[in-house]
Amino acid sequence: MRSFLIVAAICVIAAPAFAGSDLLPVKGIAGARMYDMATGEQTPMSGQTRDLGPLIWATETSTGYFWGGQASTEIALDWGDIAAGAAVGGIGWSYATNSDSVDALVGFYQSDNGFNTQPKDYIVAFNFTGLNGTVTPNNRLLFWGWLYAAELFTPFVINGADLDADGLGDFSYTYWFDPAALTPVGTIVGPRMVGDPNLDPLATGIEDVFDVYNDPNYIPAPGYIDPNLTHYVGTFWFGGPPVYAQFFMELYAPGCPNAGDSGKYCEADIANFNCMVDLADLARLLGNYGCTAGCTKLMGDIFPYDPFFPGDGVINLQDLSEMLTQYGDDCNWP
């Protein structure tokens, strides 16, 4: 482990730092939205009747900044580690902008450990149009952040090679925003940057750097992506704390298709993700009972109930009661 950390530190130091002007402050989070991939409809996240599955990978602790220096011809790529064969049924991303509207493309690769890993395997990309923009159109000096999540029609599987020998598969993801969709001309959009990775226990395999690629033949077009990422520009960071050079990202396991008797879509299915709340889930919670700090949903922190962000950071009698309320639910059937 020590040797690995030393190598990682050398890589970080070798990466050039972007200028401070490439980081811009986020005025605030304007809202959280679910994106319907069939219709493009956007609804408040708290009002959903369908449910995303358990959160299985996340880097989301906010620093209050976003990368505003991305050129129109650039594609940025960040990376992490996840258990090989992980099925992803939903994704969450976040950005900040002073534009009236945003079109975004989020893509995924596997067998990628950053620093221009070659070859890397393209998995899938998703195009999102008409995303929300500024809430202060009369003041373009303010940049507003948005949180988005989407439930996928068909889950995709990350089954990358373990290039860094830590027992997990290596994967990466891109954020790309179509400059042709920004209004008015000259407005800015960029991915939100996260902070201390120790505060995101599900953010495995991240480093304080990200890659930048460039297509010199770029022509603005909705949904553009260079799946081969052939024109490597370099690996960059922001000079250290408090801003970590990692983009906000959430990966969710496939959700359950039905609400179950309790009407909670087996949100307490935290152990084997079979859309049933059974003994394995109860045992997982009891194994972590009494946790008072850093508790996560997958450990058993499921109270107070929330269809997207349950928990209060501890695992106690209230969580056990919530588990028992849902116990026996089978969300595979109506």
Image (spheres, rainbow, N blue to C red):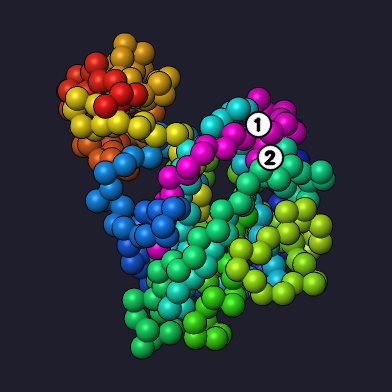
Q: Is residue 153 magenta?
A: yes
Q: CA distance from mark 1 to mark 2?
A: 7 Å
- Report the residue at 77% width, 53% height from top: 228
Q: Residue at x 43, y 45 (%)?
A: 151
State left or right for residue 202 relative to residue 159.
Answer: left
Can residue 180 be seen by looking at this rendering? yes
Secondary element under disc 2, as helix, strand or loop, is strand
Residue 110, labelled with which disc?
A: 2
Question: Considering the numbered disc 1 on the image, is that residue within a helix, a strand or a loop?
Answer: loop
Up the image or down, 283 lies above or below 227; here it is: above
Q: Nearer the viewer, residue 158 or 250?
A: 158
Q: Position of residue 321 (x, y in %)?
A: 17, 23
- Pointer 1 or 2: first along the chain: 2
Residue drawn at point x = 44 percent, y = 66 percent: 131
Quadrant of the image containing the N terminus = top right
Report which quarter residue 265 is drawn in: top left
Is there a contact, CB below 8 Å, between mark 1 and mark 2?
yes
> How far from the left and from the top, in percent, is residue 99?
46, 78
Q: In the figure, residue 263 lies in which quadrant?
A: top left
Which residues are drawn in magenta?
A: 146-171
Residue placed under numbered mark 1 in the picture: 159
Q: Where residue 232 sits: x, y (%)?
A: 80, 60
Q: Quadrant of the C terminus?
A: top left
Mark 2 burial class by Cα count in 10 Å: few <14, some 14-19, many 20+: many
